[in-house]
Image: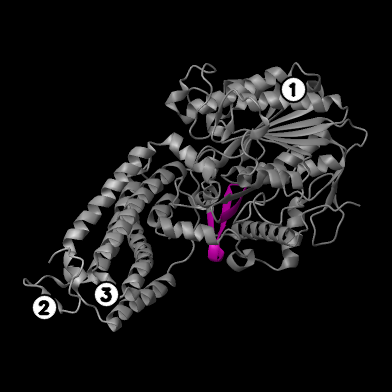
């Protein structure tokens, strides 16, 4: 047996092998089995690594542990067989006279080297992704791939990419060297067409059959979300996330009769001082106010990843990472202490804080294709004569932010390219100091016009690679830690408010500081609500006469109606949020999303609506304990489920029928 270019492909194995070899070393299909088995081993090793990487090891039972690995092997086998189809397809169609030629073998092993280096690299990527998001590849991974500039340069800045790629190439090369030696005899073995066809058809049928046994949700090996994620398969999770971006809501999630859904929704949205002014299939209502009240300016500072866990004023143990915001919140603001983000992406924060819209499964409406005319707080204020502006430190192309804002009430969109000489920038955009300094300039110019203005400012500094200008805080930016980036963001906010106090618009402006989402997702629940807690700080001498801490339960969706309520002027609304100052004693609602699961938390109960019309229930207060699964349900849980079903069903109906808007009269 040698590597000569002209092997005798017409001989039988017995004629060519002087020493009998195991069948799998003589057959290209033995190679295919080894190839598939290696994938299973790689994914199994990754699963073990992910389990060991958990910062807090829940008390998994032996049964849960074994179920997780059984579910994982099931999914891994499906994907491994699917991966084998191109290989088996080539074995089927490749002419016998080509198969043993030198050029074919060289090309084949070159492709194998690239494939296995890529597989090892993807294992590393998935490990680091899980470390960041405590999830297999999900909607975040899908969304990020749409914007490779920011994502890949961020990866380059955050990780030792060269060393990782080199290690992956070496490991891929090792596999190829071993396989080349083991399967050297396969090149000279002739395989009849019926046999080749049988192998391909068998694998295709096996793949089809296995696909019928796997659903789009993560496997249910345990009541612990992270263990279920570990039981999943990364490529399969990514495919599921990709193909459910624009899913048909009614086909995958529970629904109730349409009339009941709207009746329940209108009942939930009823609050003092509001009046429904349209038919039963609308949420349009008139909010009472005094038309003689001044049109106060509004500035919303939407903060990247600045969750409650960093704030001393919100109970962070030890050193607070936000001393500037703590002073502002406790001494001259309304501090809302029981607020949760509606999702874990910036565009989910925008969807809630700007549109007061529930976080439907699939994409946020910021990135969807029917969002050229939806309701926002900018539209409400623009109808009242305000000038509007959105200012962002990054590229407006990212997540469709520029398109969404300019189509829905904002007159101008200022982005990274409009900062001529930034003092500091990362791949995500200009630093917070530059952003806030420009915001002061723009607000000053709008104030000179005599018209009221509304500005929304979205920051980027509190994001990997966690770099910022030197000399602002004691910590060295080269260390690149999230906690240091938080301190810098707090410092920049302090500088903003210091500058704003010197401006003429300070006395007649409402300032709102709110996080788009928490810093990271962690927790065993399907929707780990504890990690979604965010601050909402409202300040400004025009509306805050004395500082106060307010514990009313709420979420991102409540920011627009609460802000408009402080201004006190009448307006029309379709918003799903509520004015937290009108009903401080009500149980409150949190509309929330995680991957493809949506939920409602209220009165110490959480209902989660999932794919394939799946429903789960949890009980507890996330500020005090981890929510525990409920197995025994009462009328209370059933009512919560129907309320959640109603709101999300109505939201989907209004959006897809293009009725989440107020047409000009």
Q: Which one is in front, 445 or 521? A: 445
Q: Quadrant of residue 228?
A: bottom left
Residue extending furthest toward the bottom:
194
Coordinates of residue 253 in the picture (x, y in percent): 60, 64
Is mark 1 in CB contact (under 8 Å) with mark 3?
Answer: no
Q: Is residue 319 above or below residue 520?
A: above
Q: Which one is in front, 3 or 304? A: 3
- Residue at mark 2 to residue at mark 1: CA–CA distance: 94 Å
Which of discs 1 and 3 lies nearer the camera? The answer is 3
Report the residue at 76% width, 61% height from top: 263
Q: Which one is in front, 569 or 657? A: 657
Coordinates of residue 572 in the picture (x, y in percent): 84, 47
Of the two numbered discs 2 and 1 on the same chain, state the one appearing first in sequence.
2
Is mark 2 in CB contact (under 8 Å) with mark 1?
Answer: no
Say if residue 222 shows up in the picture: no
Mark 1 burial class by Cα count in 10 Å: few <14, some 14-19, many 20+: few
Q: Is residue 199 above or below residue 647?
A: below
Q: Is residue 531 above or below residue 422?
A: below
Coordinates of residue 402 in the picture (x, y in percent): 69, 43
Coordinates of residue 304 in the picture (x, y in percent): 59, 35
- Residue at mark 1 to residue at mark 3: CA–CA distance: 87 Å
Secondary structure beneath dot 2 equals helix
Colour pattern: one colour
- Residue 42 located left or right of residue 632: left
Q: Which residue is mark 2?
A: 14
Q: Which residue is mark 1?
A: 546
Q: Which residue is mark 3?
A: 97
Q: Which residues are magenta?
A: 597-617
Q: Which one is in front, 367 or 16? A: 16
Of the two numbered discs 1 and 3 on the same chain, state the one appearing first in sequence.
3
């Amino acid at each position: 047996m040698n590597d000569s270019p002209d092997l005798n492909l017409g001989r039988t194995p017995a004629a060519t092998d002087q020493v009998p070899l195991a069948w799998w070393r003589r057959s290209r299909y033995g190679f295919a089995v080894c190839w598939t088995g290696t994938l299973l081993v790689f994914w199994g090793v990754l699963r073990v690594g992910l389990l060991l990487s958990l910062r807090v090891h829940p008390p998994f039972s032996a049964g849960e542990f074994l179920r997780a690995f059984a579910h994982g092997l099931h999914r891994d086998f499906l994907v491994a067989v699917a991966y084998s189809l191109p290989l088996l397809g080539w074995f089927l169609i490749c002419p016998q006279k080509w198969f043993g030629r030198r050029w074919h073998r060289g090309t084949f092993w070159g492709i194998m080297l690239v494939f296995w280096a890529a597989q090892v690299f993807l294992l590393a990527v998935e490990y680091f992704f899980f470390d960041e998001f405590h999830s297999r590849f999900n909607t975040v991974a899908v969304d990020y791939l749409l914007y490779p500039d920011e994502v890949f340069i961020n990866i380059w800045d955050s990780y030792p990419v060269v060393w990782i790629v080199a290690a992956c190439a070496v490991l891929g090369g090792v596999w190829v060297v071993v396989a080349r030696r083991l399967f050297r005899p396969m090149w000279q073995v002739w395989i009849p067409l019926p046999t080749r066809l049988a192998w391909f058809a068998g694998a295709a049928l096996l793949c089809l059959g296995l696909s019928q046994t796997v659903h789009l949700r993560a496997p249910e090996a345990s009541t612990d979300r992270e263990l279920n994620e570990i039981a999943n398969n990364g490529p399969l999770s990514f495919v599921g996330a990709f193909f459910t971006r624009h899913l048909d809501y009614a086909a995958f999630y529970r629904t109730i009769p349409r009339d009941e859904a709207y009746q329940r929704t209108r009942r939930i949205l009823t609050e003092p001082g509001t009046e429904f002014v349209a038919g039963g299939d609308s949420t349009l209502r008139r909010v009472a106010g005094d038309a003689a009240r001044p049109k106060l300016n509004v500035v919303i500072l939407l903060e990247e990843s600045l969750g409650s866990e960093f704030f001393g004023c919100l109970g962070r143990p030890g050193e607070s990472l936000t001393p500037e915001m703590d002073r502002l919140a406790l001494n001259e603001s309304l501090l809302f202490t029981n607020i949760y983000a509606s999702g874990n992406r910036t565009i989910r924060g925008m969807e809630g804080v700007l549109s007061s819209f529930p976080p439907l499964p699939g994409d946020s409406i910021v990135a969807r294709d029917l969002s050229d005319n939806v309701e926002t707080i900018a539209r409400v204020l623009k109808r009242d004569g305000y000038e509007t502006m959105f200012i962002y430190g990054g590229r407006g192309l990212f997540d469709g932010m520029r398109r969404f804002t300019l189509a829905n009430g904002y007159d101008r969109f200022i982005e990274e390219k409009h900062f001529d000489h930034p003092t500091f920038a990362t791949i995500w955009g200009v630093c917070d100091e530059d952003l806030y300094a420009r915001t002061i300039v723009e607000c000053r110019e709008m104030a000179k016009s005599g018209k009221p203005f509304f500005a929304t400012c979205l920051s980027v500094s509190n994001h990997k690679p966690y770099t910022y200008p030197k000399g602002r805080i004691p910590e060295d930016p080269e260390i690149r830690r999230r906690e240091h980036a938080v301190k810098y963001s707090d410092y920049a906010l302090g500088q903003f408010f210091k500058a704003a106090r010197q401006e003429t618009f300070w006395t007649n402006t409402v300032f709102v500081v709110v996080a788009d989402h928490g810093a990271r997702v962690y927790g065993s629940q399907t929707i780990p609500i504890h990690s979604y807690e965010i601050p909402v700080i409202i300040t400004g001498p025009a509306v805050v006469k004395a500082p106060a801490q307010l514990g009313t339960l709420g979420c991102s969706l409540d920011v627009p109606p609460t802000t408009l309520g402080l201004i006190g002027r009448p307006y029309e609304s379709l918003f799903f949020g509520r004015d937290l100052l009108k009903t401080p004693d009500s149980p409150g609602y949190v509309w929330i999303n995680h991957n493809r699961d949506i939920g409602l938390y209220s009165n110490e109960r959480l209902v989660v609506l999932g794919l394939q019309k799946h429903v789960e229930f949890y009980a507890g207060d996330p500020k005090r304990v981890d929510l525990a699964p409920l197995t025994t349900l009462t009328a209370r849980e059933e009512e919560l489920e129907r309320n959640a079903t109603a709101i999300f069903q109505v939201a989907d109906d209004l959006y897809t029928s293009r009725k989440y808007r107020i047409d000009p009269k």
